[in-house]
Image (cartoon, rainbow, N blue to C red):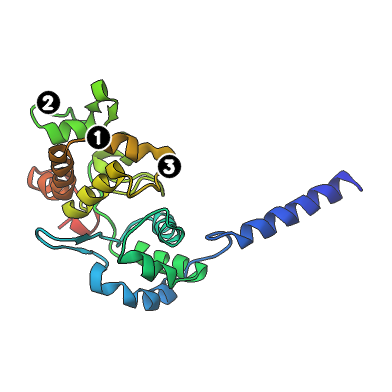
Amino acid sequence: MSAMRIAGGLGLVVGLGLAAGPGFALEGDADRGERVAGTCTACHQADGMGMAMPQGESWPRLAGLPAAYIAKQLHDFKAGRRENATMMPFANMLDDQQIVDVAAYYAQLAPWPSLPDDYRAADPGKSAEWLAERGDWSRTVPGCNQCHGPNGQGVGSHFPPLAGQHAGYLAAQLEGWREGRRRNDPNGLMRGVAERLSDDEIASIADYYATLPERLAASGAPLTGEDAQ
C-alpha cells in the first residue's frame, strides 16, 4: 500500500472520529438554539442576562459567553463533571446538536462589555483588587487576571469573562471548586486557587468583578459594547 493511500486512510479515520465526538463537526444554529433556550429563560431570563436573588441562588449571565465555553459546561453537566441539581436534568434533555445550537444562540446575544486592557498598578490597600490583579504568591495564589485577561474580560473558551457576572454566582463557583463540588477546570487549576482563599476573600473577589464595569465607567474609563452609553 502506498504512503499516499495510507495517509488518506488515516485521514478518513481521524475525520470520522472527530465527527462522532461531542461538539466536533457540529455547527451551531442560533435560530434553532433560540427555540431550545425556551426552557432556560425561567432562570437565565429571556435576554440571557441571568439573575441574582439577594441571600439566595444566582443564575449566571450567558449572553455573550463564548459558544465553546457554554457547550463544554453543558457536556460537563451531562457527564457529571459539573454538578448542579437544577442544571443537570436540563442538560440531560439535550443532544449534541441542541447543545451547540443553544450555545450559539447565547453567544450571539448582547456582547460582554469591553473594558480597558492597559496596565494599571493594583492598589495594595484594596485586597480584592490586589488578589484579582496580582494574587498572593506567598500562598501560591496567582492573580485572576493572569488567566482571565485584563480586567477579567475572559480568554478563549477555558477562561470566561468575570467582570459583570453576578457576584453570587461567582462566589458559589469559587466555593464549589474549593469544596470539590465543581471539578471541570483545566488541570485542576481553579481548585488549587480556590482552596487557598478564605470566605471573605471569595466574597470580596466576587463583588469586585461583578461591579467592575460600573466602577470603571464611573471613573471615566472608556467602555465599548453594550455598556458604552
Q: Secondary structure at mark 3?
A: helix
Marks 2/3: CA distance? 29 Å
Sequence-first tag of 1 and 2: 1
- The residue that disc 1 covers is 118
What's the amino acid at mark 2?
Pro
- The residue that disc 2 covers is 124
Crowd class of label 2 (few under 14; some 14 to 19; many from 20; radius 10 Å): few
Marks 1/2: CA distance? 18 Å
Crowd class of label 3 (few under 14; some 14 to 19; many from 20; radius 10 Å): few
**Image spot of residue 61 (x, y percent):** 25, 60
Tell me if 131 is positioned left or right of 105 in this view: left
Sequence-first tag of 3 and 1: 1
**Residue drawn where x is 43% and y is 42% of the image:** 186
Crowd class of label 1 (few under 14; some 14 to 19; many from 20; radius 10 Å): few
**Image spot of residue 194 (x, y percent):** 27, 38
Q: Secondary structure at mark 1?
A: loop
Determine the image quadrant of residue 106: bottom left
In this view, the mark in front (2 or 3): 3
Sequence-first tag of 2 and 3: 2
**Residue drawn where x is 27% and y is 36% of the image:** 195
What's the amino acid at mark 3?
Pro
